[in-house]
Image (cartoon, rainbow, N blue to C red):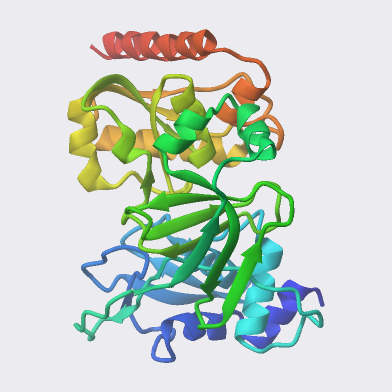
Amino acid sequence: MDQIDLILDKTNGGLKVFQEYLGKTVAPGVKFKNPFYDDTRASCNLYYGKKCGRYFLVDFGDSTLRGDCFWFVARWENLDAKNDFDEILRLIDRKLCLNIFDDRKPILASNNSKPVVVLANDHQNVPSKELPFEIVTNASLSQLDLQYWGQYGIDSATLAKFSVVSVKAFHSRRSDGTPYSICDDGHPFFGYFFNEGKGVKIYRPGQQMRFVYAGHLPHPYVFGLNQLPPTGDVLYITGGEKDVLSLSSHGFHTICLNSETAKVPENLLPSLRERFSHIAILYDMDDTGRKESANRMNELKEHDCPSVLNIELPLCGSKQEKDISDFFRLGHTVDELKDLTEEAITKQCQSYHRMR
C-alpha cells in the first residue's frame, strides 16, 4: 500500500480524519453546518463512495464544496492540496498517531482561525480560535530580498505600502497547541501584516511549506483591499499576493482572495461594482487557473456586475510561466497588459451588441 491507501485503511476511508477535526458526533447521516462559511442551514453530510472506498464531505447548498479527507485537511489548514500534499499526509499521520511516516519531519501547518462545526440541533455560537504568534523582523530588506521582488518589478515602496516585511524568526503554535518556530536560513522569508500587525501570513518562496497563517486576519481574506483607490477604471482580481504586488508596482488596481478557488465575497460586490468600471479576472494560465477564472466570471455575472473581463496571458501555463508575475519577469510590458485588457473590453462589447 502507498501512504494514501494506508491512511484511508487506518481511518475507515477518512471518516476518523473528519471526526478528528469536526468531533465524534459528526457521522454519516448526521447533517451539520459547513465550517468554511457562515452556513445558515445544516446542509453538509458525510457520504461514502463505494467505488473509491473513502468518505466525502458533501455540501448540498454549495456543490463546489465537496471533497475527501485530504481535500478537507488542506482547506482547514490553509494548505495547497496539490503543492503541499506530502505535508497534508504527514499532518494527518501525526494528528491521528497513525505512525505511517517513521521520520520526524516538522509539520508547519497552521491557520489564523480554525473553523468550527455546528450540528443541525446545535445553536451554540462557538468562537473561533486565533493562533498566537511572535515575529522578529529585519530592520530593512536585504539585497537578496530586493533581488527576489525586483525580478517581478516590485519595488520597496510597494512592499511598504502593502505592509510586507523581511522576517528573521517566526514562532507560533499548531492547531493542537504544539509550539513551533521557523528561522531565517538564508532563503527569502517574508510576512504580510494585517490589522496593524495583529495578523500575519508568512511567505517563504521556493520552500515546501510556503505559507503559514497566524493571528487576526481579515474575514473574508482579501489582500489589497485597503490599498484600492475610491474609484477606478479596471480592477484586476488575481491569483495571489505576489501578483497583487507586481500589478500594483506597475500601476494597476488589484486584489486577490485566499486562493483562486475562493469566491468573491458577496457583501463586497456592491462596493466593487460602484467603484470600478470593469472587473477583470487575471488568474494563472494553468488548468486550475483557467477553470476557476471561468467560475469567477459566471459568479460575477450572476450578481449583475456590468462589465466582467477574462484576461488570458500569452503564457504556456507551466510552473515557471503561468501568472502575471511571470509575465513581467519574462519581459512583457505594461502596455502589453493594457492591450490585452482593451481587447477583452472590445470583445465584451461586441458580444453585448450581438445579444441585443
Q: Position of residue 182 (x, y in %)?
A: 64, 65
Looking at the image, which residue is at 72% across and 73% down?
A: 4
Q: Is residue 347 visible?
A: yes
Looking at the image, which residue is at 51% across and 46% down?
A: 165
Q: Is residue 137 above or below residue 19?
A: above
Q: Is residue 296 left or right of residue 190?
A: left
Q: Position of residue 291 (x, y in %)?
A: 52, 39
Q: Is residue 299 visible?
A: no
Is the C terminus in the top left, top right, bottom left or bottom right quadrant? top left
Q: Is residue 237 above or below residue 113?
A: above
Q: How many marks?
A: 0
Q: Is residue 139 left or right of residue 163?
A: right
Q: Is residue 281 above or below residue 129?
A: above
Q: Is residue 51 left or right of residue 252?
A: right
Q: Position of residue 273 (x, y in %)?
A: 21, 30
Q: Nearer the viewer, residue 67 or 50?
A: 67
Is the N terminus in the top left, top right, bottom left or bottom right quadrant? bottom right
Q: Is residue 44 left or right of residue 285?
A: left
Q: Is residue 224 above or below residue 350?
A: below
In which quadrant of the rendered view does residue 185 lie? bottom right
Q: Position of residue 205 (x, y in %)?
A: 65, 47
In which quadrant of the rendered view does residue 119 lie? bottom left
Looking at the image, which residue is at 56% across and 34% down?
A: 284
Q: Nearer the viewer, residue 199 or 224?
A: 199
In which quadrant of the rendered view does residue 10 lie? bottom right
